[in-house]
Image (cartoon, rainbow, N blue to C red):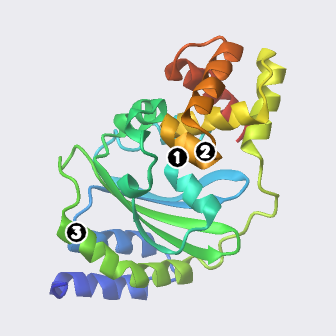
Amino acid sequence: MKALPNSAERQLAEVVRRLGRTGFESALWHFFCRCVAPDNIIILAYRDSASPEILYRHSTSPEVFARIETIFLDGAYLLDPYHELHLNHVPAGLYRLTDVAPDAFHRSRYFVEYYQQTTLLDELSYIAYPAQDVSLFICLGRDASSGRPFSPRDIEVCHRLAPLVVALAESHWETLPMQSAPRPDVAAQLIQALRTVHGIHLSPRQAEVALLILRGHSTASIALRLDVAAQTVKVFRKQLYSRCGISSQAELFSLLLPLLADRS
């Protein structure tokens, strides 16, 4: 990797000076701007039993975060690839959304209803663990305002910066409060909510399949995760749609999202 330009090095010094103080997030944003010129940034703290907490965000385009409170934080985060990384406690470091998303993510209703509306074209996220049971995501995005994804060189730079960014994040946010409540069983809560609100009775496996469909997994991907045949997944999906009185993923999304919002 080429040496960082002097302006980036000076900005990094400002980030270090701001550790544990106000202005750290803004200094970090400007450091990234010097290095890889993202269009937007959002910093989220995930805890097991709550919707993510927004610690910082910045964007030149109003569309990027226009629906984050009304859709993402209000339950749809449970369908997001990053939430699964949080639950799985993946190693700290850099992750690209296209590398961790399910195989049919870009055809999912969640993608259509949320991600497509943000105009995001590409996203790189640093994951750090500053406190027990807290996952910190520093997400850098490229959107319609620049109209281009991150280049291979941008991605290389971000990978090289990962140990530094993770160390800075874990130091600055080490006092973030942890969440003491037990991890919720989303599928079980969905079963209960469907029964209570709509009188729909799903089996645990049907609820699990419903969530995997909405997260953007194809039939083959679901079969692999559940260790069953693809034809069995098709049977589960047919039973699921029949019990819910629906015929499409769009209808499934419309039915379940309000219930996810209620439990979050």
190 with respect to 159 (left or right): right
Name the residue type under label 2.
Leu
Mark 1 to mark 2: distance in Å?
Answer: 6 Å
Residue named by callout 3: 154
The crowding category of the residue bearing disc 3, from other C-alpha atoms within 10 Å (few below 14, some 14 to 19, many at least 20), is some
Q: How many marks?
A: 3
241 with respect to 20 (left or right): right
Name the residue type under label 3.
Asp
Residue named by callout 1: 80
**Residue 94 locus on image (x, y percent):** 41, 70
Which tag, 3 or 2, sits closer to the chain's start?
Answer: 2
Question: Which secondary structure lies at badge 2?
Answer: helix
**Residue 92 locus on image (x, y percent):** 51, 75
The label shown at residue 78 is 2
164 with respect to 7 (left or right): right
Q: Nearer the viewer, residue 115 or 22?
A: 115
Q: Residue at x 34, y 84 (%)?
A: 14
The crowding category of the residue bearing disc 2, from other C-alpha atoms within 10 Å (few below 14, some 14 to 19, many at least 20), is many
Q: Residue at x 55, y 60 (%)?
A: 85
Q: Residue at x 35, y 56 (%)?
A: 123
> Could you tell me if the residues under marks 1 and 2 are in contact, i.e. CB atoms within 8 Å?
yes
Question: Which secondary structure lies at badge 3?
Answer: helix
The answer to which image quadrant residue 208 occupies is top right
